[in-house]
Amino acid sequence: MAGISAWWCYEGGVQLDGPAVEVANLTKQYRDGTVANRDISFTVQAGEFLGILGPNGAGKTTLVRQITTELFPTAGHVRVFGIDAVSQPNEVKRYMGVMPQEAGLSFGLSVRHHLRIFGKLRGLPAKLASRRAEELISTLGLQEHRDKSADHLSVGLRRRVLLGIALLADPPLMVLDEPSAGLDPEARHDLWDRLRDAHRSGTTILLTTHNMDEAEVLCDRVGIVQDGSLLTLDTVESLKAAYGYQYKITFDSAAGTETVYGSDDRTLVQQVQAKGIRQYTVARTTLEDVYLSLTRERETPAAG
Ligand SMILES: Nc1ncnc2c1ncn2[C@@H]1O[C@H](COP(=O)(O)OP(=O)(O)OP(=O)(O)O)[C@@H](O)[C@H]1O
Ligand SMILES: [Mg+2]
């Protein structure tokens, strides 16, 4: 993470102090008894790009929706730039651009109209709202869809409009729940460029994703949630060093394709050659390997 000092001037000189997001001992139990977040604590520093990974149903959206003030915690605290999200939700929302995992866009309203209306809702003067809408239509590749109503858009195009809404007011914090879900590869790379631009200009970004490349390419740090708990949160390099073993060797055996992990590539090769195997592939482990080793049972990796 770039060592950006932790304050911003926003909306006419309001100074934002402290970390962008502080989550402390957060627990969320739904009415039906489901405990979707269990005692989660972490901090997103101002200027940081933080990713949250985890299997379906792990509790990512539940976590995000407590930060965006859509849900109230059962226990614990959320603070955004030092402001309590439970007691001052409207204040907190002023500093945040949000892209929900699922959101309805009002049927019948055109893309351009949507962006303009949300711009005004975010407090932009009408002229500025129109200008931002036009800019975003162009940067998000929505030109040929600008006058279509949202109910005529494909899933991926609707996601782009939602991203546009999150970007509208140049918020100091963006909270994005699976922003790349449903995007084609080109649109995903465009999204990454948009997010990198925002990050470079100082925006703090918190996103959830199932896309390991996305997390590895974009994020300063990555957290992994499973069954409501935050298992770990660190840089990709540190996660690999702690859990992933730096190398893996893959080969075919009578049992099928096998992968063995280790911290030394030569030792791995020797182990496999000692079994009489001559065809194998050695590679560096990826974030996906770390993720899988943490979130599902894996054979005990070879020592080395
Ligand atoms: N309103 C609700 N009432 C009861 N249980 C809920 C509610 N919303 C979510 N859950 C449950 O809480 C758990 C966490 O769900 P959540 O949507 O936070 O997971 P997620 O990590 O975002 O999953 P995905 O990757 O599929 O988006 C799941 O067991 C889910 O079924
Ligand atoms: Mg979700």
Image (cartoon, rainbow, N blue to C red):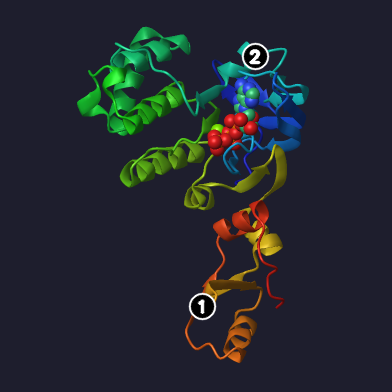
Where is residue 47? Give x, y as percent. Answer: 59, 38
Where is residue 268? Give x, y as percent. Answer: 62, 81
Is any atom of residue 247 visible in this view? yes
Asked if marks 2 and 1 touch (Cβ < 8 Å), the reply is no
Q: In the image, which disc is placed on residue 159?
A: none
Where is residue 234? Give x, y as percent. Answer: 67, 50
Placement of 106 over or under 44, stated as above or below: above
Q: Residue at x 50, y 39 (%)?
A: 199
Q: Amino acid at mark 1?
A: Phe
Closer to the camera in the image, 256 or 39: 256
Instruction: Residue under label 2, please give it.
Output: 89
Quadrant (top left/top right/bottom left/bottom right) for the C terminus: bottom right
Q: Residue at x 71, y 42 (%)?
A: 230
Q: Amino acid at mark 2?
A: Pro
Placement of 197 over or under 244, stated as above or below: above
Residue furthest toward the left? 144
Residue furthest toward the front? 254
Closer to the camera in the image, 112 or 47: 112
Q: Residue at x 60, y 56 (%)?
A: 292
Ligand 2 occupies quarter: top right
Element at label 1: strand
Instruction: Residue under label 1, please give it.
Output: 251
Element at label 2: helix
Residue 109 placement, left or right of 173: left
Where is residue 5? Give x, y as percent. Answer: 65, 37
How many residues crowd mark 1 within 10 Å: few (<14), some (14–19), many (20+)?
some
Q: How many marks?
A: 2
Is any atom of residue 65 visible in this view? no
Q: Who comes first in sequence, dot 2 or dot 1?
A: 2
The residue carrying mark 1 has its beta carbon less than 8 Å from ligand 1: no
Q: Residue at x 27, y 16 (%)?
A: 149
Residue 71 placement, left or right of 33: left
